[in-house]
Image (cartoon, helix red, strand yellow):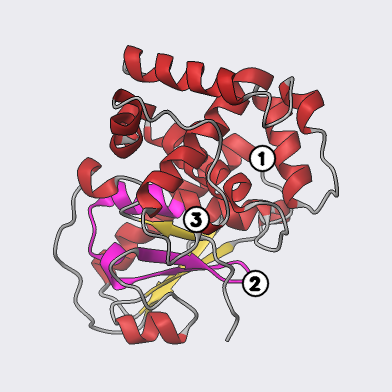
Amino acid sequence: MNRPLDRRAVLRSAGLFGLFGLVGGGSVLAACASEPAGERVRVDGDVDRALLDAIDAEAQTAARSVIDFWGPGAVWRGGAQARVRVFTDQAGFVAAGGDPDESAVTATTTQDGIVLVAPQLARAASGARVFVLTHELTHVRLGVRSAAQHWVAEGAAELTALDASGRTLTTYAPTLVARVKSAQVPGGPPDDGELSATASDLRSAYQRACAYSRFLLARSGAAHYRAWVEAALAGATSPDFSGTFGGSPQSLSAAFRQWLTGQVDAGK
C-alpha cells in the first residue's frame, strides 16, 4: 500500500457543500472497470455500472481541464492514462491509503499518483465530483512528491478546479469572504499546519491558498505562474518568487490584502 502525501481534496474546505450539496445513491453491485480507448483516465471500482460510467465521464472532463491549464506533462504523454479508484466502502478507501476522517477528506492522491475517491464523494453531486477530481488530477499532473510549501500545490489544484468550474472566487470562498468583510483580511497564504488533515479550519485554509494563487497568477500572467509552480513542485531549491511576482511574500502582503478586498467588494 502506498502512503499518500498530506494533499487531499477536502469537500468542506472547497466550499462544495454550499455550492453543490450532497446527494444519495451508489450501491455496490459488482467490480467494474472503464477504460475507453484514447481517454485520459482509467476509472475502476466496486460500484454499479451507471455510477462508474458517470464518474468516468467526469474524470475525463477533469483531465481535459487540467491539461488545458497545465499542458499534458509526463502523465499524459503518448496517450498514457491517470488512474482513479472509486470506493463505496470507507474501510476499503482507508485500506488503500485514504484518510480515515470521512467527515472532511473525500479524495486522496497516493505517492504513485492514483486518485482514491471516498464513498462520500462517490455519492456527491456531479459538479462536486468534477471539482474534486480536477483538484486531484492536478496533483497527479504536477507530481505528488515535493518539499514545497503545501499552499503551492493545494492552491494550484484548487485554482485549476475553480477555473474549470466557472465559479467566481467569492461564490467559491464564502468563509474567506466573511473574514474579509469583518476586516480580518489575511496577508498571505496558509502555512503547512493550517493545511494539515487535522487542522481546525481546512475550509478557510484551502480558500486562502486558492485566493493567493489567483493573486499571483494575476500579477505575473498564466505562463509565468505555471512555470514558477512547476519549478517549486519539482524541487527547485530557490525558485525566483520575487523575480516572478514582483516582490517577496512579505512585501506583497499589503498588495494581496488590497487585491482580495477588491475582489470581494466587486463580487468577483
- From mark 3 to mark 2, how far is it between C-alphas? 21 Å
Assess whether residue 127 is covered by the magenta stretch: yes
Which class describes the residues within 10 Å of circle 3: few (<14), some (14-19), or many (20+)? many
Nearer mark to the viewer, of 3 and 1: 3
Q: Quadrant of the C terminus?
A: top left
Assess whether mark 1 and mark 3 are in contact (beta carbons under 8 angstroms).
Answer: no
Q: Is residue 3 left or right of residue 261?
A: right
Amino acid type shown at disc 2: Asp
Q: Which mark is residue 54?
A: none
Of callouts 3 and 2, the N-terminal one = 2
Which class describes the residues within 10 Å of circle 2: few (<14), some (14-19), or many (20+)? some
Q: Quadrant of the N terminus?
A: bottom right
Amino acid type shown at disc 1: Gly
Range drawn in magenta: 105-133
Q: Position of residue 122 (x, y in %)?
A: 29, 65
Helix, strand or loop status at disc 1: loop
**Above or below — where is 155 with respect to 100?**
above
Of callouts 1 and 2, the N-terminal one = 1
* Residue that appears at 28% across and 32% down: 178
Helix, strand or loop status at disc 3: helix
Q: Nearer the viewer, residue 59 or 186?
A: 186
Q: Is residue 204 left or right of residue 108?
A: left
* Res. 39 visible in picture: no
Q: Which mark is residue 195?
A: 3
Q: Which mark is residue 112?
A: 2
- From mark 1 to mark 2, how far is it between C-alphas? 20 Å
**Above or below — where is 88 with respect to 195?**
below
Nearer mark to the viewer, of 3 and 2: 3
Q: Position of residue 101 (x, y in %)?
A: 35, 73
* Residue that appears at 36% across and 53% down: 201
* Res. 258 visible in picture: yes
List the residue tagged with mark 1: 71
